Amino acid sequence: MFILDLILKKRNGMKLNWDEIEYFVRGYTNGDIEDYQAAAFLMAVFFQGMDADETLCLTEAMLNSGDIVDLSEIPGIKTDKHSTGGVGDKTTLIVAPIVASCGVPVAKMSGRGLGHTGGTIDKLESIPGFQTSLTREQLISNVKEIGLAIAGQTGNLAPADKKIYALRDVTGTIENISLIAASIMSKKLASGSDAIVLDVKAGSGAFMKSKNEAEKLAKMMVEISRGAGKKAVAVLTAMDSPLGMSIGNALEVAEAVDILKGHGPTDLKEICIELAANMLMLGGKGSLDNCRKLSAKSLSDGTAFEKLLEMVKRQGGDPSVLEDTGKLPMASVKVDYKAERTGYIIQMNAEKFGMASAALGAGRKTITDTVDPSAGIVLLKKYGDIVEKGEPIAILHTSKKEKNSEALEILKGSVLTGEKPPPKVPIILGRIE
Ligand code: URA
């Protein structure tokens, strides 16, 4: 078999068989196929697409390129969640404790932030002492004892995806539904849970800008999961505006604690209850409606917050910063971002807010950059609110004063205003089972 034949076949719009897809994945991962030919192959896939069969094969080939975590020692149906990435998306910090506090085990492996989106591991590391590197044995014993652990990826999960993703990132081949679905699902399936809830975002701050595209991606991921013999549900959620009121690592931990203590913004709370309910349903806790009630109760009676405290103690973190979030790392410099015009906010570009937060120090440009746990943005206004020209819309937090000008430059034009209140938009856009 020759890679050139596969490039030509895909370029000409033909379907690849399993042997050919495996040949590409194996050959590129072990270095037999060069970057330039892999890039041409990915570009052919980008333009011609892959059908469900080809996408399942690509996923399985990437999944089988590395370790597959065995969580079978943990009793019960282990559930996992994955978000396709958003701005202000701290849902894992809330959803995982809800689900665990309702008796469904969660052994979650999460990632770091890259680009304009944040990552759960960076957020958790803003809690002093919190250990995100757990061995497989530690992960399993924590979940067996307290029902919950969140750790960075252990071992060598889907190394083919790591290599292919890095190449896609620099060759303009990220935004293809089959490539995204295979990339996400190879890692999720390698993480060992029995059931997966996918939070597929649609909007300006997401990979998928339209609901239609998000729905296609969601269907493909659910189908891959079924093909691999695991239960999955996808919830489509809006990512036109940042989620909640805070963006940035410690700021998002504080907001997650607020929700877990029964307060916090309603958009965030609604998404968390829906995601947790779907995980509980897959975990065998009854109908979706019943699971929504269980989730809401664990927030209002404080059991989900207690579960987060338990996990933080267990993973070496200082639980007192959750009792009093004023003790979390705090920025030394705070600057207002002010309204450019008077009117109702009709658009708040999530991607620009994410990029501005990253510029303040909350994100990284390359995987080796370090993040400033205190940096980020706190919104004072949201979509639909009325603002006066010059009134603060958000507060920028950073420990380096010089970063403010770059962030303010990015935010220019990110908030649009109109004369009339905009229509109410739902935060949950659909569900695919
Ligand atoms: N997240 C992933 O892990 N992979 C993609 O291709 C896109 C988002």
Image: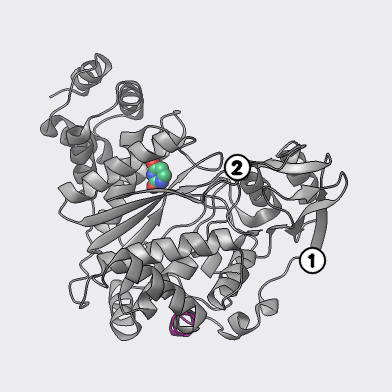
Q: Is residue 91 left or right of residue 324?
A: left
| Vertical placement of residue 390 versus 267, above or below | above
| Numbered label attached to residue 118 | none
Quarter of the image containing the N terminus?
Answer: top left
Residue placed at 54% from the left, 69% from the top?
Answer: 125
Residue type, label 1:
Ser
Q: Is residue 388 left or right of residue 100?
A: right
Neighbour tally class for label 2: few under 14, some 14-19, many 20 plus, Cα within 10 Å? many
Depth check, front residue: 181 or 385: 385
Would residue 107 be visible to someone looking at this image? no
- Residue 19, x across and y down, in percent: 11, 33
In reply to whether residue 30 is colored magenta, the answer given is: no
Numbered disc total:
2
Say what secondary structure mark 2 lies in: helix
Q: In the rendered structure, which disc, 1 or 2, sits on the residue that comes first in sequence?
A: 1
Depth check, front residue: 115 or 366: 115
* Quadrant in which ligand 1 is drawn: top left
Residue type, label 2:
Glu
- Residue 98, x across and y down, in percent: 42, 74
Residue placed at 34% from the left, 70% from the top?
Answer: 291
Q: Residue under label 2, please give it.
A: 351
| Vertical placement of residue 7 versus 363, above or below | above
- Residue 142, x across and y down, in percent: 34, 81
Q: Residue under label 1, please give it.
A: 332
Say what secondary structure mark 1 lies in: loop
Q: Is residue 21 left or right of residue 153?
A: left
Q: Which residues are magenta?
A: 308-316
- Residue 376, x across and y down, in percent: 68, 57
The residues tagged by marks 1 and 2 sit, at their Cα atoms, a distance apart of 25 Å
| Vertical placement of residue 101 versus 26, above or below | below
